[in-house]
Amino acid sequence: MSVLVYVEQAEGKFKKSVFEAVSYAKAIADQQSTNLMAISIGDVAESELKELGKYGAAKVLNVSTDQLKTFVNQAYASVIAAAAEKEGADIVVLSNSFSGKGLAPRIAVKLKAGLADGAVELPSNDGKFAVKKTAFSGKAFAITELTSANKVIALNPNAFGVKENATDAAIENFAADIKQSDLGTVIKDIVRATDKVSLPDAELVVSAGRGLKGPENWGMIEELANLLGAATACSKPVSDADWRPHSEHVGQTGIAISPNLYIAIGISGAIQHLAGVSSSKVIVVINKDPEAPFFKVADYGIVGDAFEVVPKLIEALKAH
Ligand code: FAD
């Protein structure tokens, strides 16, 4: 019995959510009195892989092959499942990120494993392996008992803190047996259409809603986002009205995000919007209506007119 954590990389680097997943997987390994292994796929420098030792990974399987340079859902799932079988890992942990959401069910099918996606707490340590997870787009919690021998858990970002647990990680190359049938759709190259920060992976997000009145007023939102190095997002009616592209629409029917900081400007905080953003670590709300529902979930709130508050924020950031 052991625990395997998949460590998703972006351009050769691990994000904070990966260290959270490793810390979480290490806590499960400790519960089960077993070791933690990690698996990385893609081009990652040895020094970066060694970082995983800081959070308790005793062994890191490194899969570095041209065929898997870019993310291929089916092939990555096959490699992770094969590594779990070969190394005797019966618990697989990964981050419930944009790609994690696609991988987790595929890995679970391959391993005939029970799946808890959107986990927010450690499994119970009473032999039941009950995992608390979000349900109905974050509107409720469910407790899922994983009764199968193999188990897959996808951890929500920002649900479990990063915990240092220094171990010396041994790096091993893992030879992946990749089937042609797993490479049905392959991304040959990624060309950035813009220099803007991509929304699903962004650590900071500046988002605006119908309170902005019209598309001509997004200049200040873009400026604030640029100054912070943040991605821009919007509410559904804003993208429905073509004020902003649909790729920026967050919420139940849009992208679900979990940045470290979410700044919501002129957005009421309808439940369908919150479904996609409520797992952000820190939420700042700027709204002229003190009764706006968004304030109930805000860590910081500014009651004020966006057209006065945002320029002041920009001025203050420029002064630093
Ligand atoms: P409004 O509700 O019009 O709110 C505008 C806010 O701006 C108000 O709170 C107002 O006080 C404030 N404001 C106005 N002027 C200013 C100013 N000058 N300065 C500061 N504040 C100001 N919505 C989503 O966002 N994402 C989804 O994924 C989504 N999915 C949905 C799915 C379904 C099935 C349904 C039925 C609805 C869905 N919606 C979704 C729509 C959702 O219910 C809300 O209608 C929507 O989120 C409201 O957008 P808004 O907050 O931008 O606009």
Image (cartoon, helix red, strand yellow):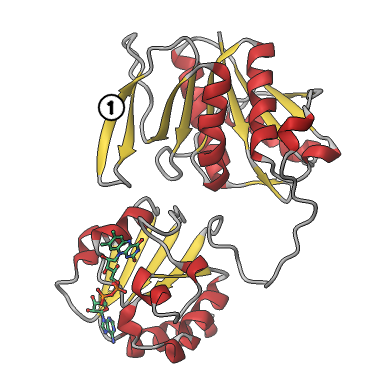
Can you tell which quarter of the image residue 52 is in?
A: top right
At horizontal 85% and vertical 40% (from top left) the residue drawn is 66
At horizontal 73% and vertical 51% (from top left) the residue drawn is 11
Can you tell which quarter of the image residue 131 is in?
A: top left
Can residue 164 be spotted in the picture? no
> In this view, which residue lies farthest toward the left?
291
At horizontal 52% and vertical 66% (from top left) the residue drawn is 247
Relative to 187, 303 lies left or right: left
Relative to residue 9, is residue 235 depicted above or below? Answer: below
The secondary element bearing badge 1 is classed as strand
Decide which of 90, 255 is in the foreground and name it: 255
Circle 1 residues within 10 Å: few <14, some 14–19, many ≥20: some
Image quadrant where one finds the N terminus: top right
Q: What residue type is labelled 1?
A: Ile
Decide which of 156, 138 is in the foreground and name it: 138
Rendered-image quarter of ligand 1: bottom left
**Mark 1 C-beta closer than 8 Å to ligand 1:** no
Can you tell which quarter of the image residue 176 is in?
A: top right
* Residue 238 at x, y percent in the picture: 38, 76
Residue occupied by mark 1:
143
Image quadrant where one finds the C terminus: bottom right
* Residue 71 at x, y percent in the picture: 69, 44
Decide which of 165, 286 is in the foreground and name it: 286
Relative to 301, 229 lies left or right: right
* Residue 96 at x, y percent in the picture: 49, 40
